[in-house]
Structures are given as C-alpha cells and as structure tokens.
Amino acid sequence: MKRFALLTAFLFAAFGAVAQLPKPAETFGFEPGADYKMATYDQMLAYYAKLDAATDRVQIIDIGKSVRGRSIKLIFISSEENMKSLDKWKDISAKLSRATISADEARKLSKEGKAIVWFDGGMHASEKAHAQMTPELVYRIASEESDEMKNIRNNVITLVVPVINPDGLDIVGSWYRKYVGTPFETSDPPILYQEYVGHDNNRDWFMSNMPETRAVTTVLYSQWYPQIVHNHHQTAPSWARIFIPPFRSPVNPKIHPGVTTGVNLVGTAMANRFAMKKMPGAISQTTFEMWWNGGMRTAPYYHNQIGILTETSHATPTPRYYPTDSVPRNVGGKTTDGTDVFYPYPWKGGESHFRDAVNYMLEASMAVLDLAAEKRDELLYNIYQMGRDAIEDKTGAFAYVIPRNQWDAASGDNLVNVMIQGGIEVHKATAAFKVGTTDYPEGSYILYGAQAFRPFLSDLMERQNYPDLFQFPGGPPIPPYDLTGWTLPMQMGVKVDRITTSFTASAQKLEGKVPVAAGTVKGSAGYGYAILRQDNASAKAINRLQRAGEKISVATAAFTDGGTNFPAGTFIVEKGKTTNNLTKVVQETGVSAQAVATKPTAVKPLQRVKVGIYKSWVDNIDEGWTRWVLEQFDFDLDTLHDTDLQTKNLAIYSAILLPSQRGEEILHGHRKGEMPDEYTGGIGLPGVQALERYIAAGGTLICLDQSTGFAIEQLGLPVQDLTEGLSSSEFFIPGSLIRMSVDVNNPLAYGMQPEAAASFQRSRSFKKIIPQRKGEGGNENTALAPAPDVVEVARYASKDLVMSGWAKGQDRYLKDKSAMLNVGYGKGRVILFGFRPQFRGQTHGTYKLLFNSIFSGAVK
C-alpha cells in the first residue's frame, strides 16, 4: 500500500502540473473557434501569462511593438529539459544556417541540435480564425502527453508569434462584436486593419518598412533561423477546406531546389494527415506560387528555410451552410469527383463553422511538427548544406559593390540597411580599392556573394525574368500571384556594380545598420543657404525648417553664387533664425546646406506646405502606403474623408492627393445596405464640384495610377488613358519595373535623374487630346483650336522598356507614351501619375516626383 502511495505521489509530481495547465477557454469564457465569438488580444495576453507561469515548457518574450504600440509576443514551447538550454539550440541553429563551419562540425551539430519550427497567426486580421487558433496550438504542444507530442517536445523548439498584427485583431474583433446579429455581421471595417498597409503587411518582407515586419525578420534571419516557417492564412478556394503545398509554377530559380522539394514534402505530410483523419477538402497546386520575394512565407525561401503557406476556409465566426446538392464541378481549377491528384478527397458541403477552420489549422500545424520531429537532424543538416551550396556557388556574382558616391547621398545606406535587416552580411571599405579599371573610394559597400543567404542577396540585386505563361496558346496570360519584377537598385535609384571576378579590398564587416550620416552647413550666409533637391531627405529638411518658422523660397532658374553653380529648383533658406535650426536639421536628416551671399535673381517663395490626402471608407492600401511615405518625410498631412471634401475649406491645402483607387469607389463608395449608413457613399457630385472649385482657384490635385481615371472623366481633362478597356491578351503588366525617361528640367522633376524605373502595377499610359474645330467649309483645323495646357513630365522609354519582370503589349501601349502629366485647370493644376511613385515604400527612386508635385502647389 505504501509503494502504491509513493507511485501515486511520483505520478502526480511528474504529470500533475501539466494536467492542471490553464486552458484557453477558462480565460476566454468559450472555446477557441466558438460560433459568433472572438477572443480579444488582452484576453490572449492574460492567457499566455497564466500559461507561462504554470509550466516550464513555455517561455514568452517581447520582440517588438506594433504601429499602435501593442506588444508583439514570441512564445517558445518544448520539453522542460530543452527549455533550460534555449541559447544552445539557438546557437546551433545559427551556425548551421550561416554555414561557415566545417561539414564534420555540421554533422555533429545536426545530431545534437533541435529542429526550430516557426508558426504565426493574426497577420491578416480579417482572416479571423488563425489568431483564435494559436492559443490552443500553444496549449496542446505544452500539455498533451501523447507519444507524438512527447516526441515533438523532445526534438523541436517551437516558436509561435500568436498574433503578428495585434492592432488588426483589436480593429477587426471590435467591429465584429459591435455588429454581430446585424446585417453587417460579416462585413469588414472601413479602415485598414494595419495602420498603414492593411493586407500589404504580407507584402513587406524584404523591405521591412513596418515595425511588425522588422520584429519578426530579426528573429528569423538574425537570431533563431528556423528550418520551417509556417504562415497561416484564410483564403482557400470556395468549397475547399484548406489550401496546402505544393504550389503551382513558376518557382524562382534563385531558390535552392532543396527548399522547393522541402515545401512539397511538408505539403504531402499535411495531405496525408488530413486524409487519415477523415478531413476532406485539402487542395494543392492552385493560385499560389513560389516566384515572388516579399511575402512572409516567400522571403524565407531565399534564406534556405522551408516557407509554408496554408489558406484555410471559413474566416468568420458566423456559421454558413453549403448545400450538398450544389457542389461545383471544379474548385480552384481541380475537379471535385476525386480524380485530381491535387484534390483527391473533395469536400461535399454541409455546415461550416469557425471551429472547423481552427481544427484544420491545428492539424496542418501538427503535420509540420511531426515531420520536423522525425526529420530533425536531416532538416538541420539540409539548411547547412544549402548554405554551403550558396557560399560555394561559382556561377553567381563574386560581390556587389555600392559606390560611396550616389546621386542621392543616402540611397546606398538605405539599400544596405534593407539588406542587413534581411540577414545579409555587408562590408564597408576602409580604403580605396580597384576592380579592373574601376576605382572605388573608401566608404563604398561590398556585399560578397559567398554567403549562405546569397539567394536573397542576388534576387534583390538582379533583374527578374518572369517566364511566359499563358492559359492556352494564343490566349490570355496566367497572372502571377503578386509581382514579376522588384529589383531593388532599380526601384531605389542606387548604382550597384555586379562583380564577377575576384578582388581584394580592405574592408570591415558592419555589425549593425548604417545610421544617418550628419549633414553639414558650409560657409557663412550673406542671404541664406541653398539645399539641393537630389537627396530625398531634402524634403524632410525643408518640411522641418518650414515648421520651425524659417522662410524658404525656390530658385526658378539656375544661378551662380561664389563660383558655385546651383540648378533650378534649389531650395533657399533665408537667413533669419536659420543657424541653429539649420544645423540641427541637417545633422538629423543628412542633407547639406551651402551658404549663398546674395538673393538669386529668379526665386519664388515657398508658402506653407500642407497636404490633404483623400481617404475613402472603402479601405485603400495605397492610401495607407502614401500616408506612411509622406509621414516619413515630415509632410504636414491631413486626412480628408468624403464629408471633408464636400464641406471643408480646401483652400488651406497646397495640394490634395488622391491615392490609387478606382473612380467608382471614390465617387460612390459603399452602397446603401453594404455597410452602416455613416460609411456609405463616396464624395459624390458635391465632392467633385468642391474639387473643381479648389483647382480652378489655383489648387493642385495629385492623382496616382487608378485615380487618374476619376480625374480625367469627372474634370473633363484633355487626356486619354491608352490602357483603358484593353484585355489581358492585348496588354498586361501585372507588376514590373518599366524604363522611364524624365524631363529633369521640368519643375516637377527637379533633382531626378534622366532615367528612372516606374513601378507598373496594371497601371496606365496617357495621350494628350488635341481638340478639333471646324474651319471654312466644315474642315477640321487643329490650328484653330487652343492647345491644351498639358505638359509631359515623364514618358515611358523608346526601347528596352522592361527593366525587370514581364510584360505583354508594352511596345504598342507604352513605348514613347506619357507616364506623368501636368494638366492646367483654371488657375490650378492636375498632376497625373500613370504609375505609383511611392509603391509599397520601395520606389525611393521616384519619391521626388511625388514630393516635387506637392511642393509645386506651394510655389506661388
């Protein structure tokens, strides 16, 4: 009897604490995935704190803050023994991923180490189930005592970011709870669920502009280096239950084939698990591909990590019924009769619940963990071998050199910082060096090709050549999932030399990001100080100086002062309070100011720069990106909703900006019944009339990409969009970099280089319409009609249009056609961008076109 009591005590000591682990439902008041229910982020934080306190199998840390200041949590789960040595497992993973150790040491560490597997939820907040699923995933890994889970805990260090976008969970969850039980129960909020980028928070994974992205990429590429990264989403094809790998073609050839086959291996494990658990509806090889670099699961490919995307159906807590007699013949391009190898177990409809989505996500995650536990040492050694293959690759570049002297002084530093955030090693020359006949000064950057993350480096530095893919011979193209071309030096306007021959240089490895190099004030002013426009940061400097009360003017013609030539467009900061303000601003922004002795002959004052940016109640990602870019450069910015445009005194704005958005959405917005009344309707006729009055009185309206169609139609501009109405069989550029010639003498192009890359996202080109009038005898005579006030600022090139990516019909519809126009309207101007000069915060090389357009409205 005593022996039985001792055994009982031992078992309680061993398993009692685990058995008593708090469950999510005990904190939430309902099971994750319950109909009509969503846990809040605060409830989740409370639950994770309880779980952390209850077991040594769980550890929680902060890795950063969201845009709105919410803490982003990273949760580690493994066995108690493994959790004692987290630093050891992290160090092993880093050594194997960076692949600078010997093969013998790598084999030893692969046997010794633990597989590192990453999961995340809550990125796309409108896909509501994955943030609700992650608490249960963490609980199950920590608490379950099955043989499978014990093996997982013993062999895997699981990393979970339960909610990548906590702001979005707050926004979407509050909206759902407010409108549940109303006609708007399944609607989405009329604002972006990430402050600036909304759905594009999954398009930021090589630039890392957003704080949430930076928090995660630091863990992925500079700390833990997981072998598998599983990114949960919820846009499965209708009538399927979950999309799982394999992906459809094409695959980017920069990706190691070991990554591609590893992705397929994980997808197969998922499919088999669903089949054996009698969970139908898993579909593969549709919609999603492995070409584009920039998504949360795609950027890991270029770091030799197996990136997994699953897209699970049923993204709302509201149940739905799918009639069993209405199963479509095809789902996602696959037949539903069970004869398609990539959809062998079709779902036949019936009731669908929020909990179903949670269950499918949990099982997909378990498939990943089970495979990782069984193939622990293989995964660890494979990531090492792929890194070695990259280091030893003799076909790639020996190095990429970014010369110190750039057109925009900070552009090279900005590109380098993108690379460092992505885990790339960068060296800085400590002395001048020479490669062939080219001399490079001290301070130039060297990015050697022989590093484990060469695929990431070379993919961002070099041109993309997307393959020709058509639905059938002579038919329309198969659209890519996202972009076809994104080469960063082209987008950012940075000169980079690809070096294929070896060279030696005295250089030091950078241990952190490059800080802003302080600018200088040169000379003592007689009249004031000149600031050139070729640096993007000049806009930030001018905005800060104007806000500090400095008087600023613009030279409308080139001038010479003290033997120094200054181009037209130079900003002149008049001598006043200037010295202290100017010194502080140039040090902070990195621009330099040159003293001028006398007032230039041709100058105009820069009046107060104040921008109104239109924000529709139809949430618009381009509005968010535009707002973010302008805030980075300290523009004085107001958001204008529909009623603001209709009723506000618009004369206070030097420029009003319409981000890229369909004219229908601007004009009419949400229809009655689609949303609560306060979020319906667009600017309507009153808004159009208000804009007409504003421009006619001397205002400046700036229209980006899609919104140009609204301006052309509603204002009757003498401009034709040459791409309007074209089919994809005639003209199709889904996301490429197009060569553009810029008139650098035009005030809207001051500071630009003569050639730039236009980010063309199914964008447009223009043609000026010449009005015709009847002459004698009824004949048309152009000479009798007044020439329209339409000035071309930039045009698409006459040859070699596609700089990076893919295009169809470009020679007919873009070659020598206008890309940017400045159109007179009364006393004001309408500036039309056929492309997006601020696209996703990537296109630094065309920022100045937008900034100059804004400044032009304040030059009177």
Image (cartoon, helix red, strand yellow):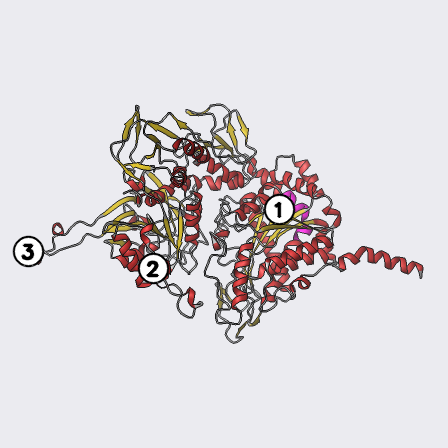
Which amino acid lies under the numbered mark 1 shown in the image of this protein?
Pro
Q: Earlier in the sequence, mark 1 or mark 2?
A: 1
Measure the alpha-carbon separation of dots 3 and 2. 47 Å
User: In the picture, residue 607 is in which quadrant?
Assistant: top left
Q: Spot the residue most to the left.
A: 777
Q: Nearer the viewer, residue 687 or 279?
A: 687
768 lies above or below 433 = below
Which badge, 3 or 1, comes first in the chain's sequence? 1
Mark 1 and mark 2: Cα distance apart in space: 54 Å
Q: How far from the left and from the top, in percent, is residue 852?
A: 33, 42
- Of labels 3 and 2, the one closer to you: 2
Dot 2 alpha-carbon crowd within 10 angstroms: few under 14, some 14 to 19, many 20 or more: few
Q: Is residue 217 visible?
A: yes
The quarter of the picture where the N terminus appears is: bottom right
Residue 336: image location, x then y, percent: 52, 68
Q: Earlier in the sequence, mark 3 or mark 2?
A: 2
Q: Is residue 279 above or below residue 197?
A: below
- In this picture, is 432 found above or below 640? above
Q: Is residue 787 left or right of residue 752?
A: left
Amino acid type at circle 2 is Thr
Q: Which residue has dot 1 on it?
A: 226
What's the residue at 54%, 55% (across, down)?
A: 167
Q: Which of these two is toward me, 574 or 532? A: 574
Q: Which residues are magenta?
A: 371-382
> Disc 3 marks which residue?
776
